[in-house]
C-alpha cells in the first residue's frame, strides 16, 4: 500500500513540476509591420515580447533619412490616414506631460529617439515593466494602440508631443 501511495504522490509531483516549469517560461509575443506614411518609403517591423512582467520592444526600420527619429505609441490602432494622423495623439493613460522616457514626467507612449545610419536603417530597443500585452490594466495595455515613427527627433520638451515632425510610418499594435 505504501508503494502505491508513494507512486501516486510521485506521479502528482512530476505532473505539478512539469506544469509549473511550462508556465514559468510562458511569454507573449507580438510582431507588427510598419506602413509608409506622408509619402515616405519607410518600412520595418516591431516586436513586443512580454516575459516575467516586462515587455521587450525592438523596432527595425529602413528607408529613413539619415539622422535622429522619434518613435511613439499613439492612442489608436488606426493607420488609415495618409499622414498617420488617424492614430491620434500620444498614448498617455496616466495624464503626464510629454517628456523623455524615464526622466521626470513622460507619456507611456514616449518611447524616444533612435538614429538611422547613412543607409537609412535604424533600430531601437526598450525594456519596461510599464507596458503589458493584453492585460486588464488600461494604463499598461499596449494592445489597440498605434506605433508611429516620425521624420525628426523628439525634443522631449515641446507639449504635447515633442515637435518630431511628420509621421513617416505607422503600425497598429494588434494581434
Image (tube, rainbow, N blue to C red):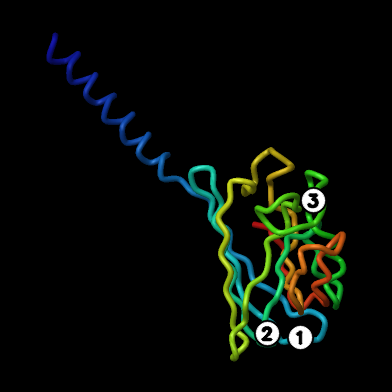
User: Whole-percent x and y of residue 66?
Assistant: 66, 87
User: Whole-percent x and y of residue 70?
Assistant: 72, 71
Nearest the eye: 104 or 175: 104
* Residue beneath disc 1: 40
* Residue beneath disc 2: 64
Which one is closest to the eye, mark 2 or mark 1?
A: 2
Q: Is residue 49 above or below residue 129?
A: below
- The residue sitting at 71% across, 87% down in the picture is 41
Q: Is residue 54 above or below residue 85?
A: above
Locate residue 8 relative to residue 42 in the image: left or right. left
N-terminal label among 2 and 3: 2
Locate residue 148 relative to residue 51 in the image: left or right. right
Element marked by disc 2: loop
Residue 172: quarter of image: bottom right
Q: Is residue 36 above or below residue 124?
A: below
* Residue beneath disc 3: 92
N-terminal label among 3 and 1: 1
Element marked by disc 1: loop
Q: CA distance from mark 2 to mark 1?
A: 8 Å
Q: Are marks 2 and 1 in contact (CB under 8 Å)?
A: yes
Amino acid at each position: 500500500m505504501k508503494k502505491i501511495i508513494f507512486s501516486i504522490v510521485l506521479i502528482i509531483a512530476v505532473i505539478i513540476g512539469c506544469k509549473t516549469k511550462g508556465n514559468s517560461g510562458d511569454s507573449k509575443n507580438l510582431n507588427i509591420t510598419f506602413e509608409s506614411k506622408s509619402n515616405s518609403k519607410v518600412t520595418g517591423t516591431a516586436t513586443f515580447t512580454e516575459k516575467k512582467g516586462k515587455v521587450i520592444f525592438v523596432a527595425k526600420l529602413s528607408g529613413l533619412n539619415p539622422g535622429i527619429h522619434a518613435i511613439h505609441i499613439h492612442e489608436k490602432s488606426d493607420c488609415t490616414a495618409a499622414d498617420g494622423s488617424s492614430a491620434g495623439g500620444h498614448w498617455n493613460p496616466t495624464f503626464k506631460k510629454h517628456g523623455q522616457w524615464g526622466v521626470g514626467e513622460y507619456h507611456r507612449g514616449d518611447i524616444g529617439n533612435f538614429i538611422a545610419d547613412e543607409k537609412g536603417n535604424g533600430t531601437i530597443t526598450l525594456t519596461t515593466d510599464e507596458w503589458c500585452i493584453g492585460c486588464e490594466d488600461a494604463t499598461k495595455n499596449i494592445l489597440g494602440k498605434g506605433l508611429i515613427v516620425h521624420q525628426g527627433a523628439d525634443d522631449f520638451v515641446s507639449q504635447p508631443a515633442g515637435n518630431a515632425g511628420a509621421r513617416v510610418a505607422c503600425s497598429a499594435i494588434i494581434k
